[in-house]
Image (spheres, rainbow, N blue to C red):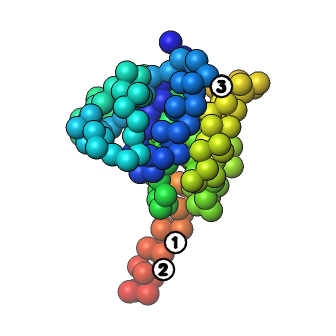
């Protein structure tokens, strides 16, 4: 079995077209999606020929099941159009999943500059990012550790900034 893709539903078109292209090229993969088959049944953005490659999981609210899902996936593709802090991406990075995110301004500051990126609304760009992950010449483990370090630095910076604000508030009240 080839790569396992985790997918969070925001912008189906890029994802669906990229997956169909992989299917047409004979690349073996599996999709885990946090929607039900019924939720996608009449969607203009989903192609039923992907159903045989897809595990329709529905909404998952159990932390243990969510952790298992991240552990069972190789690549997480975030297609969020407007999102400044995707918890699914942070969980993926935390669990060592290779992440592909939209190439938006917030990505470098939140997740670091080493995540794989693609241009929103450009299925060729997403497909190229997927190919980059599959054909990556370096060690994915080193890349993931680097991204985890970037995320840790980003979170610590936010923590220090918040702490500074709280200290100023406390100082003013004295």
The answer to whether 60 is drawn above or below residue 154 in the figure is above
Nearer-the-camera pick, 17 or 73: 17
| Side (left or right) of 119 relative to 92 | right
Q: Position of residue 115 (x, y in %)?
A: 64, 43
Is residue 93 in view?
Answer: no
Residue under label 3, please give it. Answer: 134
- In the image, what residue occupies the spot 48% across and 67% down? 163
Residue under label 2, please give it. Answer: 168
Nearer-the-camera pick, 125 or 170: 125
- In the image, what residue occupies the spot 65% across and 42% down? 124
Q: Position of residue 48 (x, y in %)?
A: 37, 31
**Residue count near mark 2 (Cα–Cα under 10 Å), binned few <14, some 14–19, many ≥20:** few
Nearer-the-camera pick, 35 or 25: 25
**Residue count near mark 3 (Cα–Cα under 10 Å), binned few <14, some 14–19, many ≥20:** few
Q: Residue 164 carries which label?
A: 1
Q: Are marks 2 and 1 in contact (CB under 8 Å)?
A: yes
Q: Which of marks 1 and 3 is nearer the N terminus?
A: 3
* Element at label 3: helix
- In the image, what residue occupies the spot 57% across and 47% down? 101
* Element at label 2: helix
Foreground tag (2 vs 3): 3
Q: Where is residue 110 in the image (x, y as percent from the top left)?
A: 57, 55
Q: In which quarter of the image is the C terminus?
A: bottom left
State the separation of the CA atoms marked 1 and 3: 43 Å
Nearer-the-camera pick, 167 or 138: 138
Q: Earlier in the sequence, mark 2 or mark 3?
A: 3
State the separation of the CA atoms marked 2 and 1: 6 Å
């Amino acid at each position: 079995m080839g790569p396992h893709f985790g997918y969070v539903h925001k912008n189906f078109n890029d994802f669906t077209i990229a997956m169909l292209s992989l299917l047409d090229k004979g690349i073996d993969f599996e999709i885990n999606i946090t929607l039900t088959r019924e939720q996608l049944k009449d969607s203009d953005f989903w192609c039923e020929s992907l159903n045989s490659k897809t595990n329709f999981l529905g909404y998952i609210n159990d932390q243990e099941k969510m952790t298992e899902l991240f552990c069972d996936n190789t690549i997480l593709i975030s297609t969020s159009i407007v999102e400044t802090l995707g918890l699914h991406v942070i969980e993926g990075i935390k669990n060592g999943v290779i992440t592909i995110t939209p190439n938006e301004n917030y990505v470098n500051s939140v997740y670091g500059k080493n995540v794989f990126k693609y241009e929103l609304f450009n299925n060729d760009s997403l497909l190229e990012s997927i190919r980059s992950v599959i054909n990556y010449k370096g060690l994915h483990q080193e890349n993931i550790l680097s991204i985890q370090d970037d995320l840790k630095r980003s979170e610590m910076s936010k923590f220090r900034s918040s702490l500074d604000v709280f200290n100023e508030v406390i100082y003013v009240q004295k």
